[in-house]
Amino acid sequence: MRVFITGITGPVGSFLADYLLTIPSLDIHAFKRWRSDPRPIEHLLGKITIHEGDIEDAFAVDRAIAAARPDRIFHLAAQSYPSASWDAPIVTMRANVEGTINLLEAARRHVPYARIHIAGTSAEYGPVRPEDVPIREDHPLRPASPYGVSKVAAELSGLQYHASYGLHVVVTRSFNHVGPRQGDRCSIQTFCRQMALIEAGRQPPVIYVGNLAPKRDFSHTRDVARALWLLLEHGVPGEVYNLCSGHAVRIGDIVDMVVAMGRVPAKVQVDPARLRPVDEPILQGDNSKLRAATGWQPEIGIEQIVAEVLDYWRQQFGI
Ligand SMILES: Nc1nc2c(ncn2[C@@H]2O[C@H](COP(=O)(O)OP(=O)(O)O[C@H]3O[C@H](CO)[C@@H](O)[C@H](O)[C@@H]3O)[C@@H](O)[C@H]2O)c(=O)[nH]1
């Protein structure tokens, strides 16, 4: 069976490939943006087939799908930073909406039998009332960021290709997915990177943070990879599934965890540049639909997530 992953260098892509490599007789192909940093996939070279291109380039996507002829497609490529989407709304729309349609069109043309996963996000829900958590899939979508809007359009495009052409499309609304090998734009990443820099003596002993009040639902990327595979095997086409741990943690508590795990003392200071125009106070998902469909359970808790990410950044700085 041939599998195709877009967004292979992104937060989840390389972990999904790692997981799929443990399943016998899968032939793994991946679509890599020609200018993306290859370091997250260095360990995969020679084990998977890489197709270079850009998800916004319909010809490149078409060519890659025609060459790989996959039976399973995991669409993870995106402009995935809510914070960046206010500064780059059009780029966000192009990558996330046009990119998804490029992929769906290529699949429709070359592999209409393929099972396709489309990655949506909890940011599609936007701000919810405390009494609405844990959020279920039937909760109204009121995204508060250009990123959230773009992912609603991507998700609906996938569902429309299912309705119009009968493609086997399954959508996840992915809550926060965290692990090593990611950049430093997301909360846990930047806190851990700064702590590692402080330990290395390369930053004064202050961790700069944004809004500490929100609560988020974090899953480890290894748990996420397993869920994605199970969902494409067992999920119902045309359906949407929350992909989350079911628990929410206050961002301020994460910062405290990082400080407590640090090898040297550090203070915490709010940097106004890190505050967003709008911030969802709580995004905590109900994962019962996913669990019922797949039997999946998250195995890695928040303490281990933070510890692994901190160790990852220590390794980056040689400590
Ligand atoms: N990035 C960042 N966030 C901070 C900081 N300080 C506080 N926060 C708060 O931490 C929360 C989580 O921010 P991120 O970790 O950046 O995640 P996100 O905005 O929820 O986006 C991530 O999760 C989405 C699913 O909820 C994903 O869809 C998206 O791609 C991304 O991975 C937000 O409320 C943010 O304001 C900081 O210094 N940096």
Image: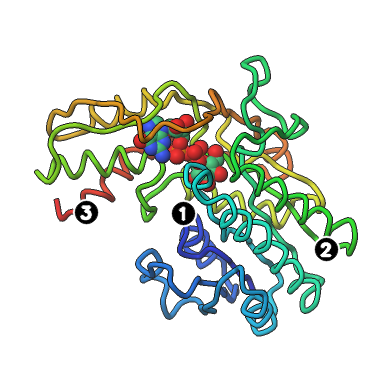
Earlier sequence position, callout 1 versus callout 3: 1
Indicate the secondary structure of the residue bearing disc 3: helix
The numbered disc on residue 315 is: 3
Can the viewer see residue 302 in this picture?
Answer: no
Q: Which residue is mark 1?
A: 11
Q: Amino acid at mark 2?
A: Leu
Q: Residue at x 28, y 50 (%)?
A: 312
For residue 69, what is the image quadrant? Answer: bottom right
Q: Residue at x 50, y 55 (%)?
A: 12
Q: Which residue is mark 2?
A: 167
Earlier sequence position, callout 1 versus callout 2: 1
Indicate the secondary structure of the residue bearing disc 2: loop
| Label 3 packing within 10 angstroms: few (<14), some (14-19), many (20+) | few
In screen coordinates, is 50 left or right of 317? right
Rendering coords of residue 219 (x, y %): 50, 40
For residue 130, what is the image quadrant? Answer: top right
Indicate the secondary structure of the residue bearing disc 1: loop
Rendering coords of residue 165 (x, y %): 89, 64
Q: Residue at x 24, y 41 (%)?
A: 194
Rendering coords of residue 102 (x, y %): 70, 69
Comparing 57 with 112, the one in front is: 57
